[in-house]
Amino acid sequence: MKKRVICLVLIVISMFLIAGCVEVDNVDELKKEGEELVCLPGEEDTTTDEGVIDTEDDEEIPETEEEETEDGITEELKDEIDDVTEDETLIEETDDVTEEVEDVVEEAEEDGMIVKTFTEGDIVTLVPKATDQDNDEVTFTFTSPLDTSGKWQTSEGDAGTYIITITASDGKSEVSKKVKVVVKSMNQAPTLGINQEVIVKEGDTVTLNPAVSDPDGDEVSVEFSGWMTSDTKTTNYDDEGSYEVVVTVSDNQLSISKSVIIEVQNVNRPPVLNKVQDVEVTEGELVEVIAKALDADNDVVTYTYIGAPIENGEWQTVEGDAGNYKIKVIASDGKNEDEKTFDLIVNMKNQAPVISPMDDILITVEPGQTKTVTLSPVISDPEGDDLVVTFSGWMTTATKDVTFDDGGAHTVTVTADDGKLETSVDVTVDINRPPEFIVE
């Protein structure tokens, strides 16, 4: 029994599909008046490229040989359905089946509609055509969102599926037909978010991390142009300045670009001071220091000396400057410094030995008497150098034996020599002979 019900319902569906968009309630009246309303076939898209429904070639709805009821169902078919519906129990048992059939009907009706596809921003235009056997004027009405002329200017956000009912009327009767209008989303440009100002220092690596997406879910590509051709770049110490990078995101149809300003700040590199050699001079000589620093930024380097009065690498020493100095030299480019130390030795200028003043020597010698003359000079050297002491003149050594016959004043020269300078002192040795007298 269930199979029979399903078959009957399917027969009914087939009749409705054949009937197309003609309202069954008006079939008899239309037959009497001789009108012919043409509808679009359900399985073929007869619209033009402009969205116009062309109905000129549609076939007329064939009349069945059997007499139809008000609902367009033959008496024989109606009787068979009535026989089945009299049994309420049977109907209850077939509820699930009829629901399934209703689903099939809805799907079939939807698949049978003409489908017109547009894109957001297009003008939807449906231009139906009809014939009237009585040559009556036929007017059309359209359900929303189409206007009274069958047009609709779509815009962004209108994407979706719309079932449009077109009704043709000759003023006495109406015929309706449904058209499915599908509005596809307009392709939207990708979105790009990025920090448009980046500040780094020389030597840093610039990394750009654009946040990209596509409202339509399209695959996008990212390109970098200008100062950077990829998303990373390592700067060097010559890159100080401002640079522009253009980031472009594309979905192969639309693209969006943004400029990023890269500010590379200078990083000062300190001067590098070479080793300074030790310096040794003698008092009175000029100290000259050779200090040399290399600066990678070619900055002007100045030098400062701490530990001695050195100016511009020079110091004119004088007597009294002798000593050992630990000198620190500082090289500066005005921002950073480097320093080194070296030894400066100022030797004391050599001075002649010093012989303390010596008194003249007076020795009285009697006839037949012998005496010894001894010279004891006091000698020193300011540098502590070893000295050689010599005697010249009347004496060649520090001592000398004298007799009465040596009477008289004699000169002895005492000389002290440090190997570089010498000092001499004359000493008078007076050999006195006492007077002799007789008494007459």
Image (tube, rainbow, N blue to C red):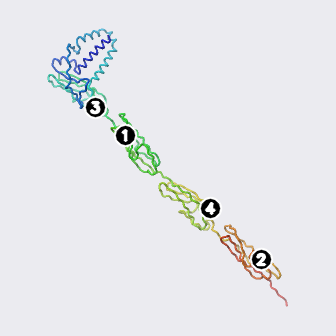
Residue 317 screen position, x and y as percent: 58, 66
Question: For the point 41% across and 47% down, which residue is it?
Answer: 262
Question: Outermost residue, left direction?
Answer: 135
Question: Outermost residue, bottom direction?
Answer: 440
Mark 4 or 3: in front is 3
Determine which residue is flagged by label 4.
324
Mark 4, Cα crowd under 10 Å, few <14 / some 14-19 / many 20+, is few
Distance of label 3 from label 2 (alpha carbons): 144 Å
Distance of label 4 from label 1 (alpha carbons): 72 Å
The label shown at residue 249 is 1
Q: Amino acid at mark 4?
A: Asn
Mark 2 or 4: in front is 2
Distance of label 2 from label 4 (alpha carbons): 47 Å
Image quarter for residue 228?
A: top left
In primary-sequence order, the first of circles 4 and 1 is 1
Tell me, yes or no, whether the two marked residues, 1 and 2, touch with CB atoms within 8 Å. no
Tell me the SS state at disc 4: strand
Determine which residue is flagged by label 2.
400
**Quadrant of the drawing holding the C terminus:** bottom right
Determine which residue is flagged by label 3.
118
The label shown at residue 424 is none
In primary-sequence order, the first of circles 3 and 2 is 3
Tell me, yes or no, whether the two marked residues, 4 and 3, touch with CB atoms within 8 Å. no
Distance of label 1 from label 3 (alpha carbons): 27 Å
Tell me the SS state at disc 1: strand
Residue 91 screen position, x and y as percent: 32, 11
Q: Amino acid at mark 1?
A: Val
Mark 2, Cα crowd under 10 Å, few <14 / some 14-19 / many 20+, is few
